[in-house]
Amino acid sequence: MSPVTSGDPIVRVEGLTAGYADVVLLKDVSFTIDRGEVFVILGGSGSGKSTLLKHMIGLYEPMAGHVFIDGDDIVTADGEARNAILKKIGVMYQSGALFGSMTLLENVRLPLEEYTTLPPPAMDLIARMKLELVGLEAFSGHMPSEISGGMQKRAAIARAMALDPNILFLDEPSAGLDPITSAELDALIRRLAESLHITFVIVTHELASIYAIADRVIMVDKRAQGIIAEGDPRVLRDTSDNPWVRQFFRREAEATESA
């Protein structure tokens, strides 16, 4: 897989230090993400990968550093400038985070109601188009409780695309899904990336998904408090000189000394 890139990074993370209270999870992390790339952030449990994503979308303020979205720093922006940045991104949270009292159509309409002044018929049309992109046009009137977990994830992606963002951030999209449904979601992500030229930033630890969707990955580690590997996941699996990286990609248990 080769991303549709222009050589102009759409995301730049510079010197990011992140944590909670006095606990530092990530220290002085820097990397870039190209336009059109499917970029995966991975690591073991507690490594800070979801924390990194939440800093990138402006949910948390870093201890130090900057996150540039299409040239604008989400860390320092506020007011209308911050809203303008947020319109450039869409987010799908791990659970899908659909509102249970609303239909799928109403869920997908929410960003349009919040950020646009379009007339209701236009909002409905756009919401239906987004549901069609993820194969759920026939379920627009269903409640989240009436559809499967995989369909809920698809609906959440449709909602994340409502404002035609340049970047989609997905937090553990395959979590809780069976292997077949997970593979179908992976195929959808690749199709959307290639047909719409959307940049995807995805947090996951699912190896099958990583190999299926990733153009490039970074691997964060809690012991190093930062990035310990970057590149094509298959190349890292086969050639990395870091034993933990090799174990992760080969799904091997960490060696322990015998008593």
Image (cartoon, grey):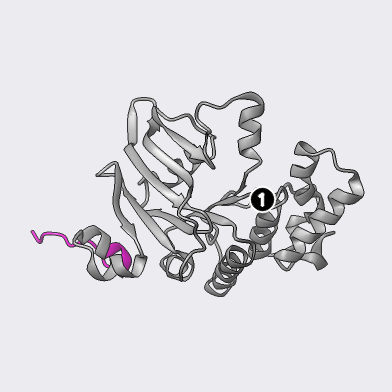
Q: Nearer the viewer, residue 119 or 59?
A: 119
Give the vertical position of 4 relative to 118 (above or below).
Answer: below
Q: Nearer the viewer, residue 254 or 130?
A: 130
Q: Main secondary structure of the magenta part?
A: loop
Q: Position of residue 104 (x, y in %)?
A: 78, 55
| In this rendering, position of residue 78 left or right of residue 245 | right
Instruction: Specify start and end residues of the magenta stretch as a single range.
Output: 247-259
Give the vertical position of 75 relative to 226 (above or below).
Answer: above
Q: Position of residue 232 (x, y in %)?
A: 36, 65
Magenta-drawn stretch contains 254: yes
Q: Quadrant of the C terminus?
A: bottom left
Q: Position of residue 30 (x, y in %)?
A: 35, 42
Magenta-drawn stretch contains 4: no
Can you tell which quarter of the image residue 57 is in?
Answer: top right
Residue found at x 53% / y 33% = 74
Kindly identify which residue carries mark 1: 160
Q: Residues within 10 Å of mark 1 (few under 14, many from 20)?
A: many
Q: Give the residue at the far left of this rendering.
A: 259
Give the vertical position of 201 relative to 27 (above or below).
Answer: below
Tell me which amino acid carries mark 1.
Ala
Q: Nearer the viewer, residue 28 or 107?
A: 28
Q: Give the residue at the far bottom of this rendering.
A: 180
Q: Position of residue 167 (x, y in %)?
A: 58, 50
Residue found at x 39% / y 44% = 48
